[in-house]
Image (tube, rainbow, N blue to C red):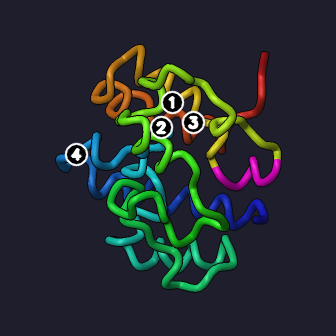
Amino acid sequence: MDKASVDQLKAALKEFEGAIAGEKVDYHQMTAPCGLPCFACGFYLANRHQALQSIISKAFGIPLEKALCSGCRNERGKCGHLPMECRLYPCAEEKGVEFCHECFDFPCDYLHPYADLAGVVWHNTKVFNLCLMRKLGLEDWARSKARSVRDVYYGENWTL
């Protein structure tokens, strides 16, 4: 994805998030077991914003109908835009945990970060999000940190 597409996507996300600010969100239902906040994901937000759906389709080079998602739990871990099956959702179900940080194996190799597509998808934020959820609680994390983790990941330079 080129910088212009990323910038256009970020601007559209900000615009639409501003339009829905204050709406009630079921953070449990709209947060994947791996810690990704579906409520802050463009693929989910595109369900209510056709222009965003079009931007996502173009930016990711996928058909318009695949530029949507109902959220991990609503899709039972099978989001149509992903290039592969998710291993985390069925694992969490099998182990009877709502979120991976509740598992005795946390963190496991299913949460391993990868450089492949790291600039395009935010999957490398999973462990950080899960640690924040465990520390702050789901609601506080969702309200105060989830979007900023995404924004820092995509918009700030790496620092030590």
Q: Quadrant of the N terminus?
A: bottom right
- Asked if the residues shown at circle 1 and circle 3 are in contact, with their CB atoms under 8 angstroms apart, the answer is yes
Dot label at residue 30: none
Task: Give x and y (percent) for residue 49.
Answer: 37, 72
Dot label at residue 35: 2
Disc 1 from disc 3: Cα separation: 5 Å
Q: Nearer the viewer, residue 41 or 88?
A: 88
Residue for badge 4: 26
Three-letter code for the amino acid on which mark 4 is drawn: Asp
Dot label at residue 129: 1
> Of callouts 2 and 3, which one flags the residue occurring earlier in the amino acid sequence?
2
Please state the extent of the stretch shown in magenta in the rendering: 116-121
Three-letter code for the amino acid on which mark 2 is drawn: Gly
Dot label at residue 126: 3
How crowded pointer 4 is (Cα within 10 Å; few <14, some 14-19, many 20+) is rated as few
Three-letter code for the amino acid on which mark 1 is drawn: Asn
119 in the magenta segment: yes
